[in-house]
Every structure is written in C-alpha cells, then in structure tokens.
Amino acid sequence: MPADTDVPPLVEMRGITIAFPGVLALDHVDFFLRPGEVHSLMGENGAGKSTLIKALTGVYAIDSGTIEIAGEERSFETTADAQEAGISTVYQEVNLCSNLSVGENVMLGHEPRGLGGIDWKAVHVAAAQHLGSLGLDLDTRSTLSAHSIAIQQLVAIARAMVLDAKVLILDEPTSSLDRGEVEQLFSVIRDLRDKGVAILFVSHFLDQVYEISDRITVLRNGQLVGEHLVEDLPKDALVTEMIGRELTDLAAIADAGEREIDRSGAPVLSASGVGRKGVLEPADVSVYDGEVVGIAGLLGSGRTELVRLLYGADRADSGSIELDGDAARIHNPRQAMGHGMAFSSEDRRAEGVVADLTVAENMILGVQAQRGWLKPIPKAERDAIVGEYMTALGVRPADPTIPIGNLSGGNQQKVLLARWLATQPELLILDEPTRGIDVGAKADIQRKVAELAAQGLSVIFISSELEEVLRIAQRVVVMRDRRHIGDLDPSDIDIDGLIDYIANTEEGSVAR
Amino acid sequence: MTAMETAAPAKKGLGERVGTFTNRHASVLPTFAAIAILILLLVGAELYFGNFLTPRNMSALLLDNAYLMILAVGMTFVIVTAGIDLSVGSVMAFTGIFGASLLSSGVPAVITIPVMLVSGALIGLLIGVLVQHFNVQPFIASLAGLFLGRGLAFVVSLSSIRVEDPVVLWLQSTRIRIGDWYITPTGILALLAVAVGAVVMHKTRFGRTVYAVGGSEQSARLMGLKVPRTKVMVYVISGLCGGLAGLVLTAYSGAGYPRNGIGTELDVIAIVVIGGTLLTGGRGYVLGSMIGVFVYGTIKTIISFMGAEQSWTHIIVGLLLLLFIVVQRAIVARSERGS
Amino acid sequence: MRLVKHRLFWPAAALVTLLIVNVVANPNFARITVRDGQLYGALIDILRQSAPLMLVALGMTLVIATRGIDLSVGAVMAVSGAVALTIIDSPSSNPNSLGTVLIAIVVAVLVALVLGAWNGFLVSVLGIQPIIATLVLMLAGRGAALLITDGFITTVNSDPLSFIASGYLLILPFAFFVWLAFVIIVGVIERRTALGMLTEAVGINPEASRLAGVRSRGIIWTAYIASGTLAGIAGVIYAANIKAADANAAGYLIELYAILAVVLGGTSLMGGKFSIAGTVIGVLTVQALDSTILFLGVPPAQSPVFFAVVVILVVLVQSPRVHRWGRSVGARFRHSDGEADAPSSPERQKEVAR
C-alpha cells in the first residue's frame, strides 16, 4: 500500500538546481520520498534523473535548494555522508567485490571480530541472517561471481540492510534479469517496503514500473513535470509527460518524408531472427533502397542492441542477414563497412569522437580505414572531402585543423556524420544522432538525412524524439523491453497514436 | 534448486559437492595447480636423480631462498591490489649494504636492524604516495623506487662490505637441528613473514580491504572501505619486506653487496604469479607465494643437479609464467563470455 | 604565446637548459675539435652514444602510442648481441670480413624481429596485458642470451664491427647516422602513410577506431614488431661498442630509460598522440643528463638516483593533482593583483562514484 500523503516524507528535496558548463541539469526540482512506498523516477536521457540521484547520494554538490532527511536539513560532502544518513544505493553494475564470498560482501567493513581477528564463523552466520530476512537462502561461503547478476543484486540489497538503510535507491536493477529473477527482486522490494523502507526505483521498463511502484515522478529537460500516484497516471499520459512535445518548424522535412518506397525488389538489408541471449529477442528488419526506417521505443527497449547486431559491432547468437538478396557474413565492423554499411553510435564520446585528433582527421578516419594504412588519402582529396562536408553540414567553427574536442556536441555529431557519409555507404545506421545537441543542429542533421534518402541512400534512424522519427521515416519499427513489437506506417499515425502503441500494444501483434 | 533440495535433503551428491567446492574456492585453484607442479617436480627429480629428496636438500631449499620468500610476501600484498612493485630487488640491495656499512662503522645491530627495515619502508612509502595521491601508475612509481634504491646502494658503497657483527652472523650460522633437517634463524624469519602475512590477509579488515581493492577499487570505495590508506600501506609493507630481505641476504652471504638483487623483482613477480596470485588483482594467497618460491628453488636445484647453466632457470621460470598467464587469460575470457 | 604552447617547447627547453648549464660549468663541453676531417668533442659523444637508447626509444614510442609497453627490449638487445657475436666469432668465419659481419647483423636483427612479433602476438591476438606479455620475454630472454654465449663474455676483434661503434662517416660518427636514418625512416612511415594517424586513433579511442573499421590488431602487432626490430639493431650497436656480448649488462634497465625519454618528449603513457621528434629530444636529454652526472664526478653506478629524481619530477609535473594545485596558486596570485577572478574549474564531483 502506498503511504498516504499525510505521512511525512522521509526525504524532502526542494528547489534543487545543478548547472554544468553549458547545461542546466536540474532546474528547481522538488522531490519527495515517503517511507513504506516504492517511488519511481521517470524520464528520458538528459532529463536529470541520474543527476538528481547523485545529488541525493552525495556525488554532486547542489548549486541551490535544500535536502531534508527526516525533517533535518543535510548537506552531503561525500558518499559516506549520504550512507551515514541511511541512504543506500544499488547500481546497475552491482558495486560489490565479485572476487570475495557472498557472506563477506554482505558484512565487509562490519565483520564481527574476536581476539584473533575476524571471526569468520560469525561473519557467515550474520550474513545468512541478513540474507534470510530477505527470503534468500544462499551459500554464504561461495564466491559472489559464481552467482547470477540477479542474485548479486539481492546480495547488494542485503548489504544495504546491514547498514540499516532507510532509503534504498535501485538504479536500473532489472536490465539484466529474466522474468523469474524480476519476480524475486520485486518480492524482496515489497517486503522491504512493508517494513517501512523508502524505495526509489529507476527503470526504463514501463510494465515493471507499473507493476511495482506506488508513486511516479516525471522529469523532463531538468524540470519537474509532475508527481502522481500510479493509479492516477495511465501509461500514455506517462509517456507523454516524459517525451513532451517540441514545436519546431520542420514542415519541409516532413514533406520530404512523405515518399513512396518501391518495396518490390530485394531489400538493401534483410535481417531475420537476429538476436543475442540476454540482450535482444530475435527480431526481423528490412530496409529498401532510399527508405528511412525509423526505430522507435523508449530507452532500454533494445533499439541500439538491434542495430549493433546488424552492423557486427556485437556478435549475434541467432539469425541471418541478407544484403541485396545475397547472404552476408557480418561478424565485425570491417566486414559491415566492406558491404557498404555505416554506423554512427549513440555514445559519441566513448564510441565516436577520437578526442585529440583534428576535425579533418576525425572526418576521414572511416575512409582511411577502408583504404588501409599504406594508401594515405592525398592532401587534395582530403581537403576536398573535408571542405564538402564542412559546408554541407554547416560545421562551426569551419576550421578543420582544430582538435575535435573543442567543438560543441552538435558540431561534433556533424563531423561524425561526415565521417560516415564520406565512406559512401549504401546503408547508414544513425543511433540518436540528434541527442544532446542544439535545435539548429538537430534540424540540419534531419534535413541532410532526408535529402540523402531521397537521393537513394537507405537509412536506419533511431531517435527518442518520436516527432523526428515520424517526420523523416517511411516505416517505423517499434521496440519495447528488448522485443520487436510491431511495424507502423508513419503516414497512418500521429504522435499520440505512436505513444499509445509503444505503451499499450501487446507483444507479438505486428501491424504491417 | 528448490526441487533438488526437497528431493534429496540429507545427502549431497558428489557432483553437488564438487560444485559447492568450486563455488567457494575458485580462487584457490591456481594455488592448487602450483602445489601440483611442485609435487611433480619433486617426485620427478627424485626419480631421476635418486638422492634429491634428502633432508639436507630440502632444508637448503628453504634457506637458500629465504630472502625470496620474504620479498614474495610483500609483493603478494601489492599485486593483490592490482599494483606492482619493481623496486624490491634494489631496495633489498640498498638496505643490505646500508646495514653492512652501519655495522662496520660500529653501530650495534640492535639499532642497525630497525634502521634497515625503516629505510625499506620509507622507499615503499614514497612509492605508495606517488601511486595513491598523485595517481602515478604503479609501474612508473615503483620504477622510480628501483632507480632510487639501486643508486643509493652504490652511494653507500661502490663495492661490497663484509659483515662481522655477531648478531647478524648468528642469524645465518646457527643451525637448529631436528633430526637430519635443519633450519636457521633466517629461515625462521622467512616462515614467520609468511605466517604473519597470511594472518593479516585473512584475519584483519586491512587484509580484506586489500582483496576488495583488487577486486574492484570503485566498489571498495563505495562500500566505505579505507581505500587510500590501504593502497599506500601495501607498498610500505613491500618496502619493509625489502628491508627484511636485505637483512636476511646480508646475513646469508656475510656481506652487503650493491649489485645484489639485479633482476630479482622479475623473479619475485613470476614466483607470486606461479603461486596463484592474479596480476589483475583480487585473488591470491601468501601461502601460494611460498609454494611459488619452492617451485622456483626446486627448478634452480634441479638445474644445478643437471650441471646445466643457471640461465636455464630464468628461461623455464619465464615459460612457466607464460603458461600461467595464458591459462589465467583463458579462464577469464571464458567467464566473460558466459555472463 | 604560441611558441610556449607548442608541444615540443618544454622538452626542447629542458634540453637546452641542460646543455647551457653544462657549458657554463665546463667550457670544454661545447668544444669541438677537428681531426683528420672528423669532429670530436663532448657534444659529438652524446650524438654517438645515444644510438642504442634512441633506437629502443623509437620503438617504445610506437608501442606506447597503442596504449602498450615493451619491457623486453633490454633482453632482446642481449639476445641480438649474443647472436651476432656468436656468428662473427664462430671458428669457421673470419671476424674481419664484411660479409660475415653483415650476415651476423641480418640474422641477429631477424631474430629480434621474431621476438617482437611474438610479443605482438601475445598482446594483439591473445589479448594479454602488455606489461605481463613483455615481462615473460624480459625474464626468459636474458636467460636465452646467456645460453647462446655459454655464459662467457665473448670478446671479439672485428674491424667492421668496430666501425659501427667508433667509425666515422664523413665528419660525424657512423652510429649517429644509423639512428638518424631510422628516425627518418620511422618518421616517414608514420607520417607519410596513414599508419601514424591510425595508430594514434587506436591509442586514443580503441572502440571508436574499431567501429570505424580500423585494423587495430594489425596496427598493434606492427608496433611490437618495430620495437623488437629496433631493439635488435640497438643490441648490435651495443655489442659493437663493447666488442663483446655481455648478456647481463646489455640493455640493462634500458627499457626504463626509454620510457623516461618518451615521456620527457611529451608522448603520454596513456597512449594516443605521439611525437618522434619529442622522443629524439627526450633521448638527447637523458644522454646529456648522463654526461652531466659523469662530469660531476659521480660514479656511473650512482646515476640512477638522479634519474629517480627526474622520473618523480616528470610524473609530478604531469599529475592532475599538481595541475589543480598550480591553478589554485596561480588564481591566488592573480587575485592578489586585483585582477578578475580566474575561472575556477567547477569541482563538482568530490568523489567519482561512477
């Protein structure tokens, strides 16, 4: 049962503002957490969820606003301060020491000691007790790494209880769990909730959020959109709050998106049953000449995982791929590029930008890799390529000799796009190319993609901004919770319909 | 899991027992492998030479390698935190000749010995501070320690210095006989170092923090453990062991010699890895390193029995190290693929 | 000041300062005499003596650029010297014949190349950490070298070999031209082909490079092959210098001096952008420092102490904590001058939890 609003909140965050250079991560956000309830914090990437949590756990300092725990104003200098205030966090990566035993992990730092040092017998007895209070029966002497991630997470929760946590934050706890393990986790969570612990639950899996939560707070673009009891907020309303609407005058691009695609011949790419255990259920995708296939779904729905398997960035366990009608082996990016594919990753910092190299070097990297080291690109050709894309994409500042790290996010993204376009691909995969960049750059990139598609380039386009997907795609593939749940024709549906589809459609119904 | 338990609650099948064992003691398996290799070597040598496994040879096995054993204890602490200490050979040489020099100028042993230990610990402290506070890679920081130790050894003296001090000489010359076996105080020191090291690693919060840091430094921090202090201390311990090893080696050879221990750090690293400690940190046992010392010593003895060049020792140890590393890598790769 | 910001400014400044100090302390240092049309002097000695370290440091630069390290170069030097001198000294050959010497050199360098390829295989194919992979050869290699020379220091009198060590080409020592040639060759290969840029990309962001289709495995393998080969040539020169194969002393600690030289030259140990010119300056600096220490009358065996201090200073200068301290000190100075506050970097994260 969710706590009444009469019960005083255990955690009161008021007017929290945190600014980083160039970005207002949190803008006067209020957040209340009551004991004995499961409260989900929802929002897309960049919404401010993780920043808010880091403020609560002492990782970030607050620029303005107050945090009160049990009525007392607190300021957390370090993570240890937050822990002392009774706030425990279990991260997605399970921050335990997998080389140590289960029992030791539970009791680490608080082991009962005797005359001769640590009393191991007592350690394991105490650990078994704490695990038992969560309904777990494990061999406490076994090494932690011998257990699944699901069990390791439960051990992490048990440790939090050793530290007498009043607030338990669970950050994406179910990403690596199967159905049965999720059930086990949820029963532990409900148990703790009934004992009075305040639980903050962060997850992208909509169905699970609705299953376990009592209350939901939604953030978007660093601002508080709303706090609701879960029964007062139907799914499509939630998705609408999370994604919001952005008014941008992109009518011309939308018109370009209304094209007829000839799907009679062999598709440029046809993937059947492509999947990977624990990562993606087997899925089918096909893309035709000049077609933009958009992939829509919330974060964590498996969009990136799918395209990485297509490109060979990750190895698929199952399925096959045909290119232009011929079977193709794609086991690594080099092979994919050899077949005319190109892939722009969603994490441009970790997987795209080669920081200390110049703008020009970043742009020609793909082409150079294709040609091999023995055939350096002649200066004239290099200048021509660089010049062409600097103008075509409007990169600012227009200086190819500066390190790419000096450019803004939007311009970096344009340079990366240029890298891929320069390889003259037949199929271009773009994963969140407009994320975290300014409105002007967003429009530039969408316009360019629509142009190229009209000229015959095939594109797979992933974006969390559903308007973008509807605007430039001729077909929309919808994903949820690591499954392909259906295909849509964007001319038949508007954004409300798409949101409803994402939120409510049962798996397996494929509307082509 | 539950079904199995209700069906056969009383007796666990052999398969389950083995499974439980490996789940509990996976990190001990490499050390078991080292023990197996040691037994193989000893038995093989005995079969081949006939008079290998004599009390005299086995006693010598410990005493000739006592200094290595002490260094291996310190190195184990460092490597379990995923660090490395390249300075141990030079620190041993420096403290050895420093001590010899002090003794020959009339400083009594009761002062000289603590000074030797402290000077080793100080170099270790320098390395630890560079690693922890200034974020220098352990490789480079201990490299500086190596340079410092080696250079200082020659600053003390360019040539060897004999030791006449009765206390120090007593450490090596006294033989305590047990039947045909014998041991000297230096041997006892080495075994003591192993015992103390093992107890600290297993029974103190500091020791458990060492393992935690090696498993995941970030997790250890988040779990509230005293990570910075621990990271510095392991290098201090290694330096201290360097000092103790300097004492033992000086007693053993009757002199301090600035050229001692050239290349020894590599032997010690190999010994520790062969003994079952992972270079990536988080797993390893001081007792395993002791086994590693015996493996090394046995190989050396076998080679001298064969009348072959001593350089074969290094080659074989190098190849053994390679074998262990490749196997370790294969095991890690398989567990990564599984998850 | 644009000049100060140039990557090579500080390394070059350090070298120049060191040379100036030397000249001031010992005016003879800068003296260059001409004899029989050949130049002699302390500066010329530096050019000649730096050959082994220069070659090793060249290879080390490439390996470090790929985020790796090669600890085996000293051992490889010992092996190649042993192989070369064993061939020259073998009973059936004439040590003074140019043909014999050339064969010896070629075989020795080939052996070194194979050893480098072995390292490359362990790192790029088996995925073993570079420190560990090259540690194996560091251990086993010296043992192998000792075996090849049967433990004896093979002393050989060979005119062609001596020419390598002390001979002159035109007005400058032959050894100088050897290293200069390789610096140019490596420089040309790295910068005139795409290999340099691709190597940097692999070192800076291995994942982005992989996704962009770069052949990381081949590039990393090549770096270790280069390192081994160059160490092989260095080993031959060293053996020529001492007219012998001393498997214990050959290249002793040279990997550490090489790493120091690379770091002094501005290449980061974290991999990525590298500078051949920087390494050249770094090696000359190390060599000059060595000469300085010798000149001060310090016994060579004690010189490691000075290098320890240099290593510590260099890493401190590169340490982020010292940079932060320096910035805050600088800010305080500017503040006390009454100028506007220096923009302090937002020390947002007190602890890095993720």
Image (tube, coloured by chain):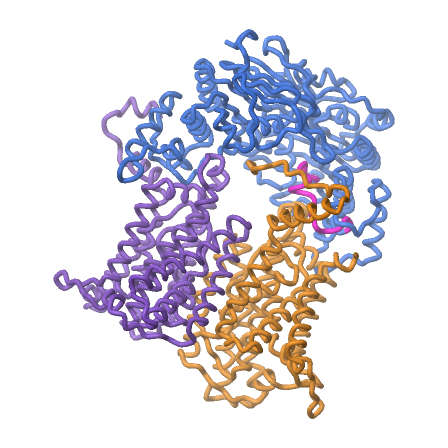
Whether A135 is among the magenta residues is no
- Looking at this rendering, what residue extends furthest in the bottom direction? C36
Horizontal arrangement in the rendering, residue B6 relative to residue B92 (left or right) = left
The location of residue A286, given as percent across then percent down, is 69, 32
In-front residue for pair A361/C4: C4
Q: Quadrant of the N terminus of chain C?
A: bottom right
Whether A349 is among the magenta residues is yes
In-front residue for pair A222/A364: A222
The location of residue B11, given as percent across then percent down, is 23, 29
What color is chain B drawn in? purple
Q: Residue at x 51, y 19 (%)?
A: A199
The location of residue A357, given as percent across then percent down, is 72, 51
The location of residue C23, given as percent across then percent down, is 67, 77
- Against A333, residue C24 (above or below) is below
Q: Which chain is blue?
A: A
Q: Quadrant of the C terminus of chain C?
A: top right
Would residue A47 be visible to someone looking at this image?
no
Would residue A504 be visible to someone looking at this image?
yes
Write down the quadrant of residue A234 in the picture. Answer: top right
Q: Residue at x 67, y 19 (%)?
A: A224
Write down the quadrant of residue B244 in the picture. Answer: bottom left
Q: Residue at x 55, y 85 (%)?
A: C100
Horizontal arrangement in the rendering, residue A121 relative to residue C310 (left or right) = left
Write down the quadrant of residue B53 in the picture. Answer: bottom left
Horizontal arrangement in the rendering, residue B112 relative to residue A241 (left or right) = left
Horizontal arrangement in the rendering, residue A33 relative to residue B56 (left or right) = right
Q: Which chain is orange?
A: C
Count of numbered badges drawn on the protein = 0
Q: Which residues are magenta?
A: A344-360
In-front residue for pair C152/A319: C152
